[in-house]
């Protein structure tokens, strides 16, 4: 059996990158031929220093006959376009919405659990299969970084005890510096500000709920307080390019433990005000805690 490990079509973030790299290594340890295929552009959460940890991936599969393992996505419409849904062998994700679909289709090969990072699930598989002591330093680093990024340094409400345990267990296999968290988020910021339009485009999705939809962009920064005022025109240009006036950008400001939301849409302001505690001053909203897209999406789906 040959396996292709892949994720979504639109972009590749640090959780996808880490999960795919680590699962590829796990399959190698089990003697299963595989390749990582990431068609989506690497977004700002995968800066150059992270890319140095894993470069053995392709943008299109080169195997002729293969089965597919999906990581960090479960909505069928977002899965990489080259994938035939009937060839999916296994799936790993950590968000609500399609658990029943995949459980019915894949049974025990569907691993959709509400943890903070998909990478946490991959580490748990290393332990389950008896390969925890064989994980490489590079993959241990990647999973640890993905967990911290996806849980916003464990400050997000999506953080679970499983994420914390995974991070602690991996610490004996990593070589991360004492300042790596701040260094990582600073690297992400530098990458974003080099080309903020592409950074936003690389982390924007349409969220469908009922008969409605909104377009949501997300930036995760160490300190995002001044971004909207400095880059308002660039933000508007890229968000308007999605051809839907009901858009908003969420800027996660980790050091401040809050989000900034930017939208010109009265409809979006009303919807956001219904689902989360938020205060708007004209087109900018503020929260008193951190909110990830997956949390907002979950609340939208409940409307």
Image (tube, helix red, strand yellow):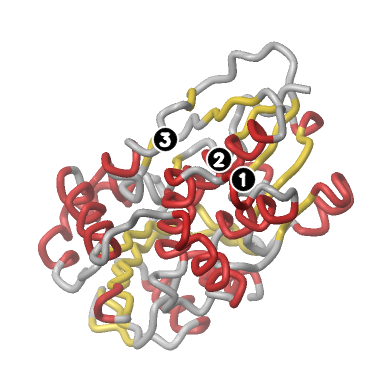
The relative height of residue 236 versus residue 135 in the rendered view (above or below) is below
Horizontally, residue 97 falls left or right of residue 191, namely right
Is residue 240 visible in this depiction of the protein?
no
| Location of residue 253 in the rendering, given as x and y in whole percent from the top left corner | 28, 72
Do residues under tags 1 and 2 come within 8 Å of each other at their CB atoms?
Answer: yes
Residue placed at 49% from the left, 43% from the top? Answer: 136
The residue identified by callout 3 is 54
The residue identified by callout 1 is 71
The residue identified by callout 2 is 20
Secondary structure of the residue carrying tag 1 is strand
Number of on-image labels:
3
| Location of residue 36 in the rendering, given as x and y in whole percent from the top left corner | 56, 30
Corner quadrant of residue 149: bottom left
| Location of residue 43 in the rendering, given as x and y in whole percent from the top left corner | 35, 44
Instruction: Give the mark nearest the N terminus, 3 or 2.
Output: 2
Label 1 vs label 2: CA separation?
7 Å
Secondary structure of the residue carrying tag 3 is loop
Label 3 vs label 2: CA separation?
10 Å
Q: Nearer the viewer, residue 8 or 176?
A: 176
Q: Nearer the viewer, residue 261 or 33?
A: 33
**Quadrant occupied by the C terminus:** bottom right
């Amino acid at each position: 059996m040959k396996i292709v490990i892949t994720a979504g079509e639109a972009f590749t973030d640090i959780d996808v990158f880490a999960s795919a790299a680590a699962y590829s290594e796990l399959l190698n340890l089990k003697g299963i031929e595989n390749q990582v295929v990431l068609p989506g552009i690497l977004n700002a959460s995968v800066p150059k220093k992270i890319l140095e940890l894993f470069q053995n991936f392709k943008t299109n599969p080169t195997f002729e006959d293969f089965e597919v393992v999906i990581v960090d996505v479960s909505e069928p419409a977002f899965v990489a376009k080259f994938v035939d849904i009937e060839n999916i062998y296994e799936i790993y994700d950590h968000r609500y919405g399609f658990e029943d679909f995949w459980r019915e289709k894949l049974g025990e090969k569907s691993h959709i659990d509400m943890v903070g990072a998909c990478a946490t699930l991959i580490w748990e598989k290393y332990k389950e299969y008896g390969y925890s002591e064989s994980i490489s330093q590079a993959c241990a680093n990647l999973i640890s970084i993905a967990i911290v990024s996806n849980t916003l340094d464990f400050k997000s409400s999506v953080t679970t005890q499983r994420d914390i345990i995974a991070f602690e267990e991996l610490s004996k296999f990593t070589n991360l510096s004492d300042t790596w968290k701040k260094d990582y988020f600073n690297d992400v910021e530098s990458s974003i500000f080099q080309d903020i339009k592409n950074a936003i485009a690389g982390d924007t999705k349409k969220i469908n709920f009922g008969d409605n939809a909104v377009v949501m962009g997300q930036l995760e920064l160490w300190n995002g307080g001044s971004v909207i005022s400095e880059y308002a025109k660039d933000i508007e240009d890229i968000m308007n390019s999605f051809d839907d006036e009901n858009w908003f950008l969420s800027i996660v400001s980790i050091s401040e433990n809050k989000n900034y939301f930017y939208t010109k849409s009265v409809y979006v302001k009303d919807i956001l005000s219904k689902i989360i505690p938020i205060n708007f001053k004209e087109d900018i909203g503020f929260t008193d805690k951190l909110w990830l897209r997956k949390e907002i999406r979950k609340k939208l789906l409940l409307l």
